[in-house]
Amino acid sequence: MDIKRLTIADLHAAYASGSLSVEAVTGAYLDAITHRDGKVKAFLSVLASTAIERAEALDKRLAAGEKPSGLFGVPMAIKDNLCLAGTRTTAGSQALENYIAPYTATAVQRLLDAGAVILGKTNLDEFAMGSSTENSAFQKTTNPWDATRVPGGSSGGSAAAVSAEEVLVALGSDTGGSIRQPASFCGLVGLKPTYGRVSRAGLIALASSLDQVGPFARTVADALTVFQTIAGPDAADATTIDAPHVDAAVLQKGFKGLRVGVLPDAQMAGVDPGVAERVADAVRIMEHAGATIVPVQVTHIEDCLAMYAVMVTSEASSNLARYDGLRFGTALVPEPKEDFAAYTQRVRGATFGAEPQRRILLGTYALSKGYAGQFYHRAQTLQAVIAQEFDKVFASVDVLFGPTSPSVAFPLGAKFNDPLTMYLSDIFTVPANIANLPAMSMPIGFSQHLPVGGQFIAARYREDSLFQVAAAFEGESGIRNLAAPAQ
Amino acid sequence: MHLSDEDIAKLGALGRLHLSPEQRHAYAEQLSRIVAYTERLNQAGSSVPTTAANRIPLPANHLREDMVRPVDADVVTAQASKREGRFIVSPPIA
C-alpha cells in the first residue's frame, strides 16, 4: 500500500482499524520531503521533530479509543505567511528572515485542534505578491510536473508540496488567485472561500479587503474537510461571519438541476488553445451528465485586473508600512547621526525585494492627494458595480465555469522581468476576489503533458454549490487524486 | 501618465524606500506601463459616479469592545533590534 495515495477518509479508516499509525504516515511523508524537496524546493522550514512528537501523541489517543475525525493524523503544510507560534514565519521576505511568530493564526490553530500534523512551512512569493513563487527571497520552487516550470503563485510552495506528495493537504492564501492559479498549474483542487468565511487573524496581510485563507488538496472531499475545519467566525477578525455550514452530503448530489454559466469567447480572449479545448471538453462532460449550460455575460469583468492592481497596491503599501527594522524583523546597524526616517528607508530599501517595492511605490501613488479619487476610490466604485453584475448572473445560474489561468504552467523566468505580463496571468482569478465571491480551481485534463485547471465561481457564501459541482465533475471525469510522478 | 525617475524618487521618500538611481529608472519604466493599464478604470462604467455610496460594503465590520488587556512587554519587545529594559531603542526621530 502506498500511504501517500490515501485520502483523509482512507487514512481515518486505516487508523480506526489499526492497520496504520499516525507515526507511520507522518514518517512516510517526511521521507517524501527528504527525497523530493531538494528538487521541488517547496519548504522553507520542515518541522520534523515536532511532527513526530505530535504523531506519537495522536497514536496514544487512538490507543485510548479515540475515533479519528476532522483532520486527525493528517500531514499538512502551511504557507509561510501564516503564523505558527514559536516557528520562523518569513512571508518569503528578507525583512522577516528570522522572525519568530509569537502566536498562532486562527486558521492554523483550528487545524491543530482538529488533529492535523503540520510538517512544515512552505515557500511563497514575497508577502504573497506574485504568480510564480519566483519572488521569494529564499528559493525558487519548481513545478513537480516539470522542474523547468513555475508552480504558480503566490502559494506555490503549498501547491508543489501537495502535488509532489510531500503532504496530503495544505493551506494557502488567495488575494487575486494565489491558491487557484497554483492549484491549476499543479493539478490540484484549490479553494478561495468567500471573503469573511475564514479568519485572517495571524495571516501576514497583503491586501486586507481581499485576502482569504483556503485549502489545497488532491480530491474535492479532502478540500471540503479542510474548509469545514477552518471556516467560521472569529473574534480576532471582525470581518468573519457565521455563514451556513457546508455538509459533506453535497458531494453526492451530482449535476442534476445545476445551472452552469459560461462566458462568451470574447470574454476569454488570450487563452491558450490547449486550455480552451479542455474547458470545452469539461463543458461537454457537465452537459452530458445533466447540468444545464447557460451562456452568460459579466459586464466589466475585463476591468477587474485594473481594479485589482490599484486596490492591492494601495492596501499593500499601507500594510507594509509596519516594517521599520526596529520593533521586529531584520534590522541593520544605524549609521552615525542617522535619524529614524533615513534608517527606515535604508532598511526597507535593503530588505524588500523588487515586487514589494513596486507595490509600495504604486500604492503610494494611487493613494496620494489628487490621485486617490482617480485610482483607489474609482476602483472601489467599480468593485461595487462588478459585484452587482455577478449578483445578476447568479440569479440565473448556480455557478460560473471557465479556465483558471490563460495557460498551463509557464517556464521559470519567462515573466519574471515583466510585472504587467505577470499580473495578467491572474486575469481570470481576480474577479472573484474583487466581488468577494468563493471560487475553486480543479484539474480538468492536460495540455502539453501539464495539468489544466478549470475554475468554478459561486454566489457569496455558496461554497456548497462549488463543492457539489466539483465533486460531480470529479466523479464524471475520473480526474481526481492527481500527483506529479517523481522525476 | 508617464512617471519620471524624479517621480519615483518622491514616491520612494513617501513610501520610506531608499532606491538607487538604477532602481528608480527601472521602476519608472515598469510603473508607467502599469499606471497606463489602470487608466482604463476612468473609461469603465463612466456613468457611475465615484462616491462612497457606490462602494461595496464589507460583509461584517464591527469594533471590539474598547478595553484594556494585559500585554506582556517582554513578548512585544522580544524581537526588537535593540532594547533598554521595557523599551525599544530607536535612532533619533527628527
Image: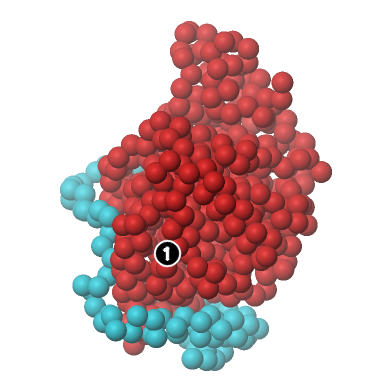
Where A137 sits versus A482, above or below? below
Q: Viewed as shown, does residue A25 lie left or right of A360?
A: right
**What residue is drawn where x is 21% and y is 53%?**
B63
**What residue is drawn where x is 43% and y is 35%?**
A253
**What residue is drawn where x is 74% and y is 62%?**
A411
User: Which chain is disc 1 placed on?
Assistant: A
Tell me the element at label 1. Answer: loop
Among the chains pictured, the one given red colouring is: A
Where B94 sits versus A43, above or below? below
> Which amino acid, mark 1?
Val
Q: Mark 1 points at which residue?
A: A296
Residue B90 visible in rendering? no
Quadrant holding the C terminus of chain A: top right
Among the chains pictured, the one given cyan colouring is: B
Q: Nearer the viewer, residue B86 or A455?
A: A455
Q: Which of the 4 image quadrants contains residue A356?
A: bottom right
